[in-house]
Image: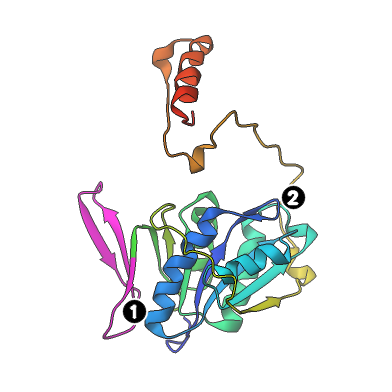
Amino acid sequence: MMEPSAHQVWTLAEQTGGKLKLISFELLHWGRTLADKLRTPLASIVIGNGVGDEELRSLIAHGADEVYSLQDPRLSSFVCETYARILCSLIHNHCPAVFLGGATTTGRTLLPYVAVKVHTGLTADCTGLDIEEETGNLLQTRPAIGGNIMATIKTPNHRPQMATVRPRSIKPLCPDLTRRGRIHRIPIEDEMIDSRVRVLGVEGLEADGTVLDSAERVVSGGKGLRKVENFTLIQGLAQDLGAAV
């Protein structure tokens, strides 16, 4: 259990090929609101390889006071075991009060692993976050019972208070290029990289048109189409609507 006096608010930045994803900036908006209410610094955590200074500074422009950059060529591919080990070490060294991640493939894989390792709670798929005035506890709101009610959850006795937040639940703050902050470049020790998993290669699918995870509209088809050739009807409709398939 972390000490209740732990202070900073943290967000997990996600990146692919050195480029930060939209969820990184959405989380900073949530984090900025919480940090201001707690009167504490907001930090963004970047793990990976090839994320340049301009990308790191963009996190500060979008609300971060500090950026922890943990980069190494061996971190180019996401391996949950390795990323979790690095995050757990960082948490034990700095004891944040709040740690937010996206309810994305990465966040849903990584944050539960970390929560177990640091012996704290995790609320998944939040759509709202706030601070309880009397206690300073994080109020984590999410749909429950098939979306019929909204449940608000607290983690009063353990730190960090962890939550994953649904993408597009909030828009990023407008960037302020005059903001100043600190970038901490933290070296990666060899034992942190040691893993039972070895990534042999990564192959991405070429998307025709709109990418699914950032699409405003989606057209889908199933077994009713009967054969692959009929999917051209779906693809044509999606193209006309500017939608993803």
Residue tagged by mark 2?
Answer: 198
Query: Could you say where residue 8 lies in the image, as x and y percent from the top left?
Result: 50, 81
Q: CA distance from mark 1 to mark 2?
A: 39 Å
Region in magenta: 129-158
Vertical arrangement, residue 27 with respect to residue 118, above or below: above
Q: Which residue is painted at 23% across and 57% down in the image?
A: 150
Q: Is residue 112 visible?
A: no
Residue pointed to by mark 1: 137
Magenta stretch containing residue 59, yes or no?
A: no
Say if 49 sits above or below 1 in the image. Answer: above
Judged from the image, the secondary structure of the residue bearing numbered disc 2 is loop
Label 1 environment density (alpha carbons within 10 Å; few <14, some 14–19, many ≥20): many
In depth, the one of 135 and 24 nearer the eye is 24
Apparent side of residue 95 relative to residue 183 in the rendered image (left or right): left
Inspect the image, locate mark 1, and give the three-letter code of the amino acid beneath it. Answer: Asn
- The answer to whether one can see residue 99 in this image is yes
The label nearer to you, 1 versus 2, is 1
The residue nearer to you, when weighing 73 against 114, is 73
Q: Single out the residue that lies furthest toward the bottom.
A: 5
Position of residue 150 in the picture relative to residue 100 (left or right): left
Rendered residue at 50%/43% (across/down): 214
